Image: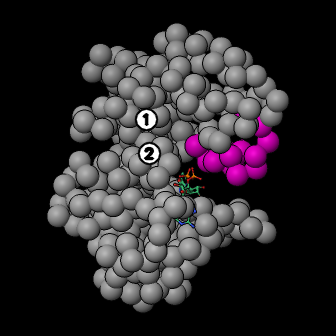
Amino acid sequence: MQELPEVTDPRVIDGRKIAQGIEAEVKKEVDAFVKRRSIRPALATILAGEHPPSKLYVKLKHWACKRVGIVSEDHKFPQETKQEEIIGLIEVLNKRPEIHGILVQLPLPKHIDERAVMMRIAPVKDVDGFNPLNMGKMLIGREGFVPCTPKGIVRALSEFNIDPQGKEVVVVGHSNVVGKPAAIMLLNRNATVRVCHVYTKDLKSHTKEADILIVAAGVRGLIKADMVKEGAIVFDVGITWQDERVYGDVDFDDVLPRVKLISPVPGGVGPMTIAILMEHTLAAAKMQAGE
Ligand code: NAD
């Protein structure tokens, strides 16, 4: 795996450090929960196909479970698996009381309707926040399980005591996984939010206005210094794999001199996303135990 340099620049958000803080807290609470209820939180992951990055992300999630004392189960399907087989497993996992969280690693193979699959995860076990019920709750500001990546961004802002209220937030990317939930969660915190995407005309005219810029397009180096406001806070969510390395959507070296804060790739949003997943799995176990 790619070596991460130590973060020494105060402008660089150390996602690993924030994640370690979250995981330490989760571990403490998991230990107390196990003592109190004799129930160990458990996460089941579902992976279909042979997409190497997805395999790595699932592995990282299982390692995180181990670190915090959460049991994890690894379910794998071949690329050509049928949608009904995945849904069948979800139905079984929904009914198993010792499984508290279910995570379907995206993307699923192209012949599978991701939305149809996500809808079948019981909302109380939907630790990734993709079930339409949880999405709808988020839309009306009753955030339960929300997608882990934008929640990690919100958490990072609070770590730096940055209140999004009244700030200009620009989100690049409008997927259900990152862009839209990030926009809604920041809107719920009274930011002024605009969402850009591949059909946005003159992207720069928008990004230049952002106090907080969240970039989740999956286009390596999309954001250059002249697209960023002086003193902005930049979250780079994008991941592009090239030659066994990962690259973000932000041209980091170009943009760094202009920013107040920036999350690097790797070592930024990714580890925080996984730590939030751990937090959600614990929350799911508590909820299912009636706490
Ligand atoms: P997606 O492909 O579903 O959506 C991409 C979005 O970016 C779309 O809204 C599209 O319109 C927009 N876009 C594409 N090209 C653009 C351009 N040139 N200008 C402006 N907008 C453009 O992807 P996604 O699932 O939202 O993920 C986005 C990126 O974030 C990917 O690289 C993904 O790997 C990464 N990701 C990282 C994490 C993490 O934990 N770090 C989690 C989820 C996704």
**Which amino acid, by three-letter code, is at mark 1?**
Gly
Which is the main secondary structure of the residues drawn in magenta?
A: helix
Q: Quadrant of residue 244?
A: bottom right
Question: What residue do we see at 66% from left, 64% from top?
Answer: 240
Which quadrant of the picture is home to ligand 1? bottom right
Residue 222: assigned label: none
Q: Is residue 261 above or below residue 55?
A: below
Query: Could you tell me which secondary element the residue under label 1 belongs to?
Result: loop
Q: Is mark 1 within 8 Å of ligand 1?
A: no
Where does the image place residue 101, in percent across and percent down from the top left? Answer: 49, 27
Q: Is residue 7 or residue 229 the one in the foreground?
A: 229
Where does the image place residue 16, in percent across and percent down from the top left? Answer: 48, 61
Query: Could you tell me which secondary element the residue under label 2 belongs to?
Result: helix
- Distance CA(mark 1)–CA(mark 2): 7 Å
Quarter of the image with the N terminus is bottom right
Residue 55 is one of the magenta-drawn residues = yes
289 left or right, relative to 70? left
> Who comes first in sequence, dot 1 or dot 2?
1
Where does the image place residue 14, in percent across and percent down from the top left? Answer: 44, 68
Quarter of the image with the C terminus is top left
Question: What residue do we see at 57% from left, 25% from top?
Answer: 116
Q: Is mark 2 within 8 Å of ligand 1?
A: yes
Q: Which residue is mark 2?
A: 148
Q: Is residue 203 or residue 21 the one in the foreground?
A: 203
Question: What residue do we see at 39% from left, 73% from top?
Answer: 207
Q: Is residue 231 or residue 191 the one in the foreground?
A: 191
Residues at circles 1 and 2 in contact by the CB criterion of under 8 Å: yes
How crowded is the residue under tag 2: few (<14 C-alpha within 10 Å), some, or many (20+)? many
Where does the image place residue 30, in percent across and percent down from the top left? Answer: 39, 33
Which range of residues does the magenta coloring cover?
Answer: 48-61
How crowded is the residue under tag 1: few (<14 C-alpha within 10 Å), some, or many (20+)? many
Q: Is residue 16 visible?
A: no
